[in-house]
Amino acid sequence: MSEMQAAVLPVTPLQQNCSLIWCAATKKAAVIDPGGDVDEIVAALGKQGLTLEKVLLTHGHFDHAGGAAELAEMFGVPVEGPQEEEKFLLDVVEMQGFKWGVAGGRNVEPDRWLTDGDTVTVGELTLDVIHTPGHTPGHVVFFHAPSRFAIVGDVLFKGSIGRTDFPRGDHDTLIRSIKEKLLPLGDDVTFLPGHGPLSTFGNERRTNPFLQDG
């Protein structure tokens, strides 16, 4: 079974965790959530000697999707994800960025919308797609079961959870997504959030104040 390797590249002034994941056997790679700073992403691909195979998106906020169209065009690769409910956000990426004072993002139309239970491939790797609404309605998480590693976007953070005060966010839905879809994957799963440090589902189940009942 091919090994998955990963690197994290904080991009944009919001320090969003763009990630490179690649198949060790084939050196084929995906960039997940290229929010901006495309030149830095391209340099990282070159430094690792990787061939970009696709761009993956967890959701449609500009700091996650702003560089997707440029990167996909540059390498002639498809954009996959998120779930189709994110179209209203991906259609206004440029305007979102402008409002936050971050220029250069472009609206993007994915080549493939994803839904719960789908899989995506990167080289010889297969990742499970988990639909996790709440922060946004069409948010998805990518889970590589053999590595016990998940890329969760802005659903869950170390000690916190995603904001739900943006358009079509919903707190109760977000908590259900975390408790019913992510935590059951196992306490040993390490996750990369959209911002900030890595954690594990077990650590968040035990200590995250937003996940403690009563």
Image (spheres, helix red, strand yellow):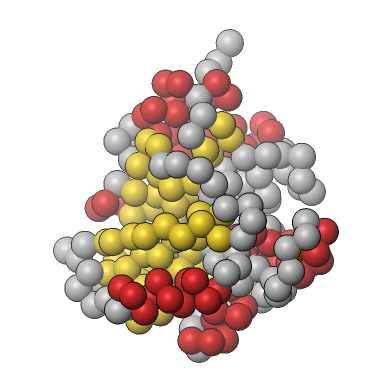
Is residue 176 in view? no
Q: Quadrant of the C terminus?
A: top right
Side of 194 where 203 appears, left or right: left
Q: Position of residue 7 (x, y in %)?
A: 37, 60
- Residue 109: name its quadrant: bottom right
Q: Quadrant of the N terminus?
A: bottom left
Residue 167 drawn above or below residue 88: above
What residue is rendered at 80% in x and 64% in y? 98
Residue 157 drawn above or below residue 159: below
Nearest to the observer: residue 51 or residue 54: 51
Is residue 32 in view? yes
Nearest to the observer: residue 116 or residue 152: 152
What residue is rendered at 44% in x and 52% in y? 151
Nearest to the observer: residue 149 or residue 185: 149
What residue is rendered at 44% in x and 26% in y? 205
Nearest to the observer: residue 54 or residue 74: 74
- Residue 46: name its quadrant: bottom left
